[in-house]
Amino acid sequence: MKLQQLMSYARRAIDDYSMIQEGDKIAVGVSGGKDSMALVYCLKGLQRFYPNHFELEAISVDLGFGNIDFQKIEEFCKIVEVPFSIASTDISSIVFDERKEKSPCSLCAKMRKGAFNTLAKEHGCNKTAFGHHKDDIIDTMLLSLIFEGRFYSFSPVTYLDRMDLTLIRPFMYVEEADIIGFANKYEIPVLKNPCPVDGETKRQYAKELANQIQRDHPGAKDRMFNAILESVESYQKDRYPLQH
C-alpha cells in the first residue's frame, strides 16, 4: 500500500468521526511495532495538508524489560520530523516479578496507558492516537464475546474524562495486511515486542479465530466489522440524541 492510499483511509476515518479539530496536539502511542510506526508516518503526511492544523508528538512507554532499542524509534521520528519522548516505568517488574500475574495483559495495558496518558498531559496534548486497525477491532469484539459475555470493541473516538483526553483511532478502516505491505514498501523499522508472553495471549487466540472464520466464510470479517460500526452508531445516538 502506498502512503497516499493509507492517508486516504485515515482521512476517511478522521472525517467520519470528527477526530481532529483545529489546534489539537496529538500524542501518538509508539510501541515500535508496524502499526504505531506507520501511524506516525501517516499522520505526519496528513499534517501537511489537512484543513485543521494540528501538532504531533510520539510517545513510547518503556516497560522496563531492557530489550527494546528506543534509539531506532527516535531516529525514525527524527527523520519524519515528529518530536519523540519516552515514559520510563517499572511495569515489567511489577507485573511479572512482584505480582507474578498469570494473565498479565490486562494489568500491563492499564499501567501502560496510565503512564502514556500522564506524559501526554504533561506535554500539553489534548488528544491521543493509537494504531488499532480494522483487524484489531474485530479481534477485540471476539475477545469480549468469548471471555466477557458482552458485545464490545474499540470505539473510533473515546473521551477519557478522568484525564481530559480524547483517544482517536485513525486506522480503523485499514486492514493489517495493508499496514504490513506499507511498512515493507517504505522500509519502516519495526521492533520486536519485548513482552515474554507475546504470541501466547487470548488476543492471539482471537486473532487466529477471526482468520479461521474468514477462511471458512469469506467476507465474514467485513460483516463483523459492519456490525461493530452499527453498534457504535446506536450507542452514540442513544447517548447524544441531540447530535443526530
Image (cartoon, grey):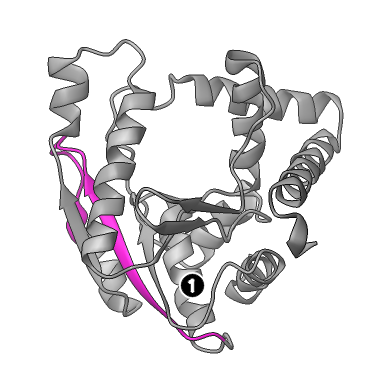
**Where residue 211 appears, x then y in whole percent?**
69, 29
Q: Is residue 101 left or right of residue 239?
A: left
| Relative vertical location of residue 157 with respect to residue 81 in this rendering, above or below | above
Instruction: Tell me which residue sits at (50%, 59%) in the image.
Output: 184
**Where residue 239 appears, x then y in whole percent?**
69, 48
Q: Is residue 5 left or right of residue 184?
A: right
**Pointer 1 residue:** 43
Q: Secondary structure at mark 1?
A: helix
Badge 1 density bin: few <14, some 14–19, many ≥20, Cα 10 Å: many
Instruction: Tell me which residue sits at (53%, 48%) in the image.
Output: 132
Assess whether residue 104 is covered by the magenta stretch: no
At label 1, which amino acid type do we have?
A: Leu
Assess whether residue 67 is covered by the magenta stretch: yes
Residue 5 sits in quarter:
bottom right
Tell me the magenta residue range. 52-71
Please state the total of marks drawn on the protein image.
1
In the image shown, does 18 or 200 lie closer to the viewer? 18
Instruction: Tell me which residue sits at (19%, 56%) in the image.
Output: 86
In the image shown, does 36 or 98 lie closer to the viewer? 98
